[in-house]
Image (tube, rainbow, N blue to C red):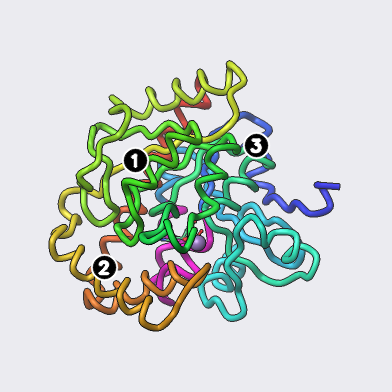
Amino acid sequence: MLKDYLSIRPEIQSALSAGKPVVALESTILSHGMPYPQNLDFGRRVEKIIRDEGAAPATIAILDGKLKVGLNDAELERMCRAEDVGKVSRRDVPVYLATGKAGATTVATTMLISELTGIRVFATGGIGGVHRGAETTMDISADLQELAHTSVTVVSAGVKSILDIGLTLEYLETMGVPVLGMRTKDFPAFYCRESGFKVDYALRDEEEAARIMKAKWDVGMKGGMIVANPIPEEYAMDSKYMNGIIAQAVAEAKEKGIRGKMITPFLLARIVELTGGESLASNIQLAFNNARCASRIAVAYSRL
Ligand code: PSU
Ligand code: MN
């Protein structure tokens, strides 16, 4: 039974029961997306941002055979130290539950667990997508399938150009996933406010995002939505410079034969090194910005 596997923190359970806003956060961004101890400081501060906006933060992970919704400080620290913490996408969930291994949840699994719990809004940095060269590797993140089927709104700063952004957007169109720009028509490229691609619709504000979610789910359409929220101007990086760095990191990954689930963590770590840490500061700020946006959407949705 589901309840044998689900462990929800009391603070979050009572918010959900009362129809109050809750925002989910993933743990792969902590365990495999940022170095220690910056990830721990980030993990604590992002929760505070959500609380300050009037929502309850629920960082999600798989620990001790349970789907954990909301972590205490010791659990957060464990995820950030990331010793013996795997990266858990949809296919890995049953293995981690049955064996008790510690797992950091990706966008796909965080959505899955959010839906099981009743959480409708989730803030992250960037989602996975169609990798460059996917026409031969078939490397397409399970995040995209999850967005097609699981009814959770994901606030992200677009996708990194470690992916093929054009193909990622085509795939999302095929899967029927709305891609909405927060106050912009430009689909953002994570560190940069523009990718050269456009979104389907520009949202006027967070309240409009909430009304679109309600309309979609009211008529019985399953599946998620992407709110693409560009990095704040003051933290955005030069796109020529970043594209050069990313091209170098992608070439190194290819040379080293890195494939499958370790490719994204490898590229993220390399990009931080190659930019001398500058990309990490931007990554942290864009994720804070997404948490703020997601909280406002969750608050608006709870009032509808
Ligand atoms: N992109 C980022 N930072 C991340 C990830 C992606 O800029 O931390 C993580 C997310 O957890 C995402 C996952 O769900 O990588 C995608 O991995 P894969 O491509 O193996 O599905
Ligand atoms: Mn992959």
For marks 3 and 2, give the CA distance. 37 Å
Q: Which residue is mark 3?
A: 118
Query: Residue placed at 70% from the left, 56% from the top?
Result: 67
Q: Nearer the viewer, mark 1 or mark 3?
A: 1
Query: Residue placed at 50% from the left, 22% from the top?
Result: 303
> On the image, which quarter does residue 277 sit in?
bottom left
Q: Residues within 10 Å of mark 3 (few under 14, many from 20)?
A: some
Q: Which residue is mark 2?
A: 246
| Position of residue 258 in the picture relative to residue 285 (left or right) | right
What SS does tag 3 mark? loop
Q: Residues within 10 Å of mark 2 (few under 14, many from 20)?
A: many
Query: Residue placed at 51% from the left, 38% from the top?
Result: 121
Relative image position of residue 107 (x, y in whole percent): 52, 52
Residue 203: which numbered mark, if any? none
Which residue type carries mark 1? Ala
Towards the viewer: 45 or 134: 134
Which residue type carries mark 2? Ile
Residue 228: which numbered mark, if any? 1
What SS does tag 2 mark? helix
For marks 2 and 1, give the CA distance. 21 Å
Q: Does the CB distance between marks 2 and 1 fall below 8 Å?
A: no
**Badge 1 or badge 3: first in the primary sequence:** 3
Q: Nearer the viewer, mark 3 or mark 2?
A: 2
